[in-house]
Amino acid sequence: VRVVGIDTPEVEHPGKSAGCFGEEAKAATAAWLLGRTVALEPALEQRDRYDRLLATLMPADGPIAGRDLARTLALSGFARELPIAPNTRDAPTIAAQVRIAQRRRRGLWSACGFDAAFPGKEAATGG
């Protein structure tokens, strides 16, 4: 499953450099998932070019604002926004949460910043 609306630093990807704070983002994702029953809300466009399922992950006990995985990682400083049409419904909210994390220097925004966390990538526009 590919979480819609965010991008976390690379950890293991053939031919790409690992990003600063990638291991921390991976651990935060695992901690969020640990012991939790998760509901998947498929995205409008349900598969990416690698045939991964595109979805929003939220606690199975029901959607509560700010509790889905993408928003949690964005607000905590473990991810950047990555709006990809047509799956942009939550892009403004995720972008706002990334800006809060940046202003408060949470996570990767204090540890290393965009260029070290996402080497060779451009900042998202829009959202």
Image (tube, rainbow, N blue to C red):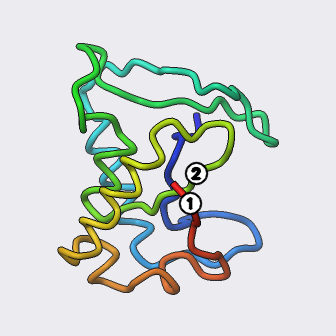
Quick one: SS at disc 1?
loop
Q: Amino acid at mark 1?
A: Gly
In screen coordinates, is 52 left or right of 58?
Answer: right
Say few, some or many: other residues with alpha carbon within 10 Å of mark 2 (under 14 / 14 to 19 / 20 or more).
many
Q: Amino acid at mark 2?
A: Pro
Mark 1–mark 2 contact, CB under 8 Å?
A: yes
Say few, some or many: other residues with alpha carbon within 10 Å of mark 1 (under 14 / 14 to 19 / 20 or more).
few
Query: Could you tell me which residue is drawn at 68 percent across and 26 percent down?
Result: 46
Q: Is residue 23 above or below residue 34?
A: below
Q: How many marks?
A: 2
Foreground residue, 90 or 7? Answer: 90
Q: CA distance from mark 1 to mark 2?
A: 7 Å
Quarter assignment of residue 71 = top left
In screen coordinates, is 94 left or right of 102?
Answer: right
Query: Could you tell me which residue is drawn at 30 percent across and 65 percent down?
Result: 77
Quick one: SS at disc 2?
loop
Coordinates of residue 82 in the picture (x, y in percent): 56, 56
Query: Could you tell me which residue is drawn at 52 percent across and 85 percent down?
Result: 115
Tell which residue pokes out farthest to the right in this image: 49
Quarter assignment of residue 70 = top left
In screen coordinates, is 1 left or right of 36?
Answer: right
The residue labelled by disc 1 is 126
The residue labelled by disc 2 is 83
Q: Is residue 41 above or below residue 49?
A: above
